[in-house]
Structure formats: structure tokens, C-alpha cells
Image (tube, grey):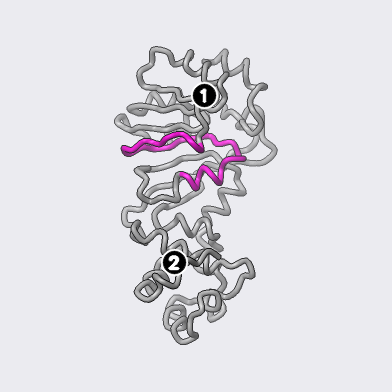
Amino acid sequence: MSGVKRRHTQRLASGQHLLRSPLADELAAAAGIAGGDLVVEIGAGTGRLTAPLAERAGHVIAVEVDPRLARLLRRGFQGDGRVTVVEADGLAVALPESPFRVVANLPFAITTPMLRRLLDDPSLPLRSADLVVQRGFAVKRCSPRPCTLLSAGWLPWWQLGVERVLPPDCFQPPPSVESAVVSARRRPRPLVDAAAADDYRLLLRRAFRRDNRAVRVALGLERRRWAAFARPRGLADDARPTQLDVWDWAALHAHLRPSSASRWRGARA
């Protein structure tokens, strides 16, 4: 595949930046792929990451939206039963119904929708994800506090962390900003039952109002009831949504749930 990589590096679609080969090898190794694993690679490009993944996994589904690159991938991995090339949009491709892992060097433009596709549904049989994203995105989404609405919606089921920072020269062509590898690992014990995911996220949306009200006010809680929950957790009477971490949100959901199902259902703030 080396000739293919050199010839097409400058013809990549906007937002595509190829990892240099040693780093692609390291990313595949760090993802903890085992011999029986099914791996989905989103945005396979020229196969620079596909090859080291195939050496470690049971099978790799290499997803590439660019027809030209998909043809090159099929040609490069022809006869290799470990790799299936799928020409499709990573945001729309059918995901496996059996347990799988995702490893991807994502175009920055699809980072948020791709993370939402992978992490929003806790019943998806995804075991882990290792994703190259923009560093600013990685820091924001992996911060336990301040915690964003989007991150708080994922963290009851996923442990998110920044594995490493990648300078622009790690890529061809180099992007204008630093990148980072974000890892998502399923929690051994979720903080919120998967069956309650919708109610939990409705609570979050109600609390994370754009006017940045105190959580107690946004949720319409009596001061005494909020104090009984918040004070043992070190939270102020006027604590804002970003000042609660995912453990606080999970505990608040459990605290309110017996009397809140009808209140949060239909709340779309």
C-alpha cells in the first residue's frame, strides 16, 4: 500500500489527514485489539491504519466514503480475508449487531456526530473506541468538571480519557491544530441503568438551560430538597450544571427518579 499512500496524500478530501506509519502502528497496538475482535475502522483512507489493525484483530471492517479510496483499499487488501472494505458514509453505515470495537482517525468535521452515534445508545454492542480527534474537543469532552451536557450524557456508561497528544507533523498533510487520541471504555458497572437513559438525558436537558440557571431553579426543586442532596456532596445552593460531575448527575437522577418520570418526560429544553 505504500505507493498508494504517496500518490494520493495530496488528493485527500478536506479534513482528511493521514497518520504517519509508525504512529498508526502505535495506535493499533494501544487500542488493545485481540485476535478474536471485530474492529470497525471509520474513514480508512489509504489503509495506513487498516494494515496494523488487521495484523491484530480477528476481522476489520474498513469503512471509506470516497469511492476512489475505497477502490484502492479493495485492491490493496485483495485476497486478505481479514479485511472487508465497505464504501459508505461512516455516519450512516450499518454497525455490527455483535460486539465490536472502533478505531479511527476521524475527519474533524464529523467528530461530534460520530461520537454521538457510537456513545449515545448504551445498548449498542460497542466494547471500546479509540479515536483521533482535535485536541480541543478531546480536552472538553473528557473533562470530569466542568462537565458539558454532551459529556454528562455519555459518562454514566463510558470512561473517557485522553491517551496522547499528537502534534500536527504526525500527519500528512499536517492539520492546523494539535490532535489527540480519545479512548472510550465501557464502565464495568454503569452509573445509570441503560433502560433509564432517556429519562436521565431529559433531566440533563432540563437542567442545562441556555440561561445557565442554578440547577435547583432550572429543575424547580424546593430549596430544602436540593440542600438535602447537594450539601453532603459539596455543591452550593446555586450550583450551575457544569459544576456537577457525572457522579453527581447519576445520584441526582436516582434521588429524583421516583417522582420525576412524568416531570422530565416531554421536557425538551
Residue at x 55%, y 78% (from the top left corner): 217
Say which mark, if any, is on residue 65: none
Residue 251 location (% of width, % of height): 39, 70
The residue lying at 50 percent from left, 85 percent from top is: 223
Q: Toward the viewer: 23 or 96?
A: 96
Q: Which SS class for mark 2? A: loop
Q: Is residue 15 left or right of residue 241?
A: right
Within 10 Å of disc 2 (Cα), the crowding (few <14, some 14-19, many 20+) is some
Q: Amino acid at mark 1?
A: Arg
> Which percent across, then down, holds residue 91?
51, 38
> From what the image shows, is residue 94 above or below residue 125?
above
Q: Which label's residue is closer to the chain start, 2 or 1?
A: 1
Vertical relation: 97 (above or below) 207: above
* Image point (57%, 40%), residue name: 110
- Which residue lies under the disc numbered 1? 48
Residue under label 2: 265
Q: Secondary structure at mark 1?
A: loop
Q: Residues within 10 Å of mark 1 (few under 14, many from 20)?
A: many
Q: Amino acid at mark 2?
A: Arg
Residue 146 is inside the magenta segment: no
Quadrant in the picture for the C terminus: bottom right
Judging depth in this view, the residue of 261 and 137 nearest the camera is 261
Q: Position of residue 256 (x, y in %)?
A: 40, 74
Tell me residue 30's x, y (percent): 43, 37
The stretch in magenta equals 91-117
Q: CA distance from mark 2 to mark 1?
A: 46 Å
Query: Is 156 above or below relative to 22?
Result: below
* Above or below 144: residue 181: above
Task: Decide if residue 126 is on the left or right side of residue 223.
Answer: left
In this rendering, the count of numbered labels is 2
Instruction: Look at the numbered discs 2 and 1 and tell me whether their residues touch, using CB distance below 8 Å.
Output: no
- Would residue 115 be counted in the magenta stretch? yes
